[in-house]
Amino acid sequence: MTHEANPAIPTAVLLRQAGRACFHHLVNTTPVLIHVRSGTKVVVIRDMPLRLETGDYGLLPDHQPMTMENIPKVPQNYEARILPVPRALFEETYARLGSITPPLTALPAKAKDLPAEAVALFESFCSPESNAALPAAVATVRMMELITWFALSGAVLGKREGLLLQDRLRQMIETDPAYDWTSGDAARAFHMSEATLRRKLAAQQTSFTETLSDTRMTRALALLHTTTLPIGHIAQEVGYDSPSQFAARFKERFGINPRDVRGSAGALERIGAEVAHLRTDKISA
């Protein structure tokens, strides 16, 4: 039986990585709940590290540059489930509870001693068929329940300051990374001249070209982590007709070849990685 995705239910993905690697300056545009199933994940934001071991659950904030290191536990791959959740749901949940005060600084957080009820709820969101028939209102309430369990276990999403122009630009590019975006497209979307766009991005230590390339490479990394798509196909998904040009840009950005993310000789394909839905545009790692 085929189950259609319920738009009220976030789409979880299974992330696998064969070798140890560290990725710098990754940005999620949506907060994510994470469960490390095998190996270790180290996340650093503003020089504040968080270490998640096998079996740990955590929360990663949005729009915060992060350094992430995924460390496999030999002979197994690093493996984690990632569940993106709209920020608005966190904010609505905290407002209804009243007793939860979001931190002023958005940092990664570990959910300590998450009870069995919360674990089962997390797993249900990782199995689309178990929630596909739920009315949107019920699915939303269940997701807010999961957010509450995480908050009561110490994983509370910090407050977010107003989005920077580069954050808004990243969100725009994520809607279609393969599109031939231009600075003129962005200027028109943000109701400003191209000169003003360049000036404002420069004040944020970036440029249109840098943000475009970084957003595409982040999407490519997510696809490598969570799918078995051929690398040539991934190159096209993020706007590169030439796989070799894509591989060179990827190595320039992350310091490793795209194939290294999956391990030698197609290790990821051999273990049969599967994802229920291919919606990784808002997930970095």
Image (cartoon, rainbow, N blue to C red):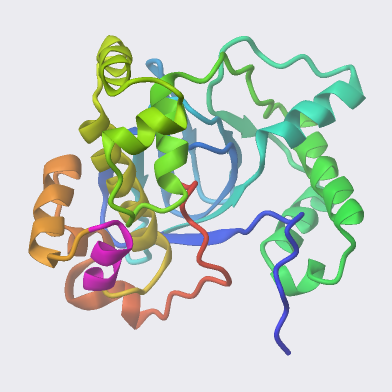
The residue under the point 91% across, 54% down is: 138
In this view of the protein, can residue 156 be seen by the observer?
A: yes
Q: Quadrant of residue 49?
A: top left
**Residue 54's spot in the image, x, y percent?**
52, 50
Q: Main secondary structure of the magenta part?
A: helix
**Residue 161's spot in the image, x, y percent?**
57, 13
Q: Quadrant of residue 31?
A: top right
Residue closest to the eye, 167 or 94: 167
In the figure, is residue 97 to the left or right of 147? right
The residue under the point 84% across, 55% down is: 139
Q: Is residue 115 magenta?
A: no
Read off the magenta span. 231-239
**Tag count in the figure?**
0
In the image, residue 269 above or below residue 11 = below
The residue under the point 51% across, 20% down is: 163
In the figure, is residue 2 to the left or right of 69? right
**Residue 211's spot in the image, x, y percent?**
29, 33
**Residue 86's spot in the image, x, y percent?**
66, 40
In the image, residue 11 above or below residue 251 = below
In the image, residue 260 above or below residue 36 = below
Q: Quadrant of residue 124?
A: bottom right
Residue closest to the eye, 111 or 213: 213
In the figure, is residue 87 to the left or right of 97? left
In this view of the protein, can residue 43 be seen by the observer?
A: no
Q: Quadrant of the N terminus?
A: bottom right
The residue under the point 15% across, 57% down is: 246
In the image, residue 193 above or below residue 89 = above
